[in-house]
Image: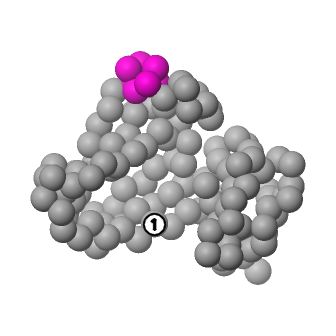
Amino acid sequence: MFPFADPVAAPSCTLPSLKDDIGYARPPRHVLEAMLAVRLHLDDCDAENVPLRVASGSHLSGIFRSDEISWVVSKYVEAPCIAPAGDTLRMRPLLLHASSTAIKPRHRRVLHIAYHAGNAVAEPWHRSLSG
């Protein structure tokens, strides 16, 4: 789900919702394929702090339905993303990813920036650096 400037009405965006007066939706596959997310770890993220888990290679297969997730996880190798503070993780938003509750809770702050290099989207992003 990505934030948009206004509540989403474009039929190409699915699962629209509103959270804290910000419109969210899932852009179409071609938009997601043209995106790159960069996660800058502000805190150490080790096995006890339960790092992000990714299904390596799953981004190449598109968007999955909720009832397909177990199958996807069994097909692709699930990998934890262990990272010390200051490390970055670059990933495609279509990459199946999740996190769980920490074993030993402490900060695991991340600055998450999503870049889009494709054509203009049907709805304006919530925050955009484009002119």
Left or right for 32, reference 79: right
Left or right for 107, reference 6: left
Residue 129, percent from left and from top: 66, 78
Q: Is residue 82 above or below residue 58?
A: below
Q: Nearer the viewer, residue 95 or 106?
A: 106
Q: Nearer the viewer, residue 119 or 51?
A: 51
Q: What coloring was used for the rendering?
A: one colour
Residue 109, percent from left and from top: 31, 70
Which residue is painted at 54% across and 48% down in the image? 93
Work out which quarter of the rendered image holds the C terminus and state it.
Answer: bottom right
**Considering the numbered disc 1 on the image, is that residue within a helix, a strand or a loop?**
strand
Residue 130 in view (yes/no): yes
Q: Amino acid at mark 1?
A: His
- Decide: few, some or many residues near mark 1? Use Cα within 10 Å; few <14, some 14-19, many ≥20: few
Q: Quadrant of residue 1?
A: bottom right
Report the number of discs.
1
Residue 118 in view (yes/no): no
Which residue is painted at 30% across and 48% down in the image? 100
Q: Is residue 57 above or below residue 8?
A: above
Residue 116 colored in magenta in the image: no
In the image, the segment drawn in magenta is 70-76
Which residue is painted at 40% across and 34% down in the image? 55
**What residue does disc 1 label?**
112
Residue 70, percent from left and from top: 43, 25
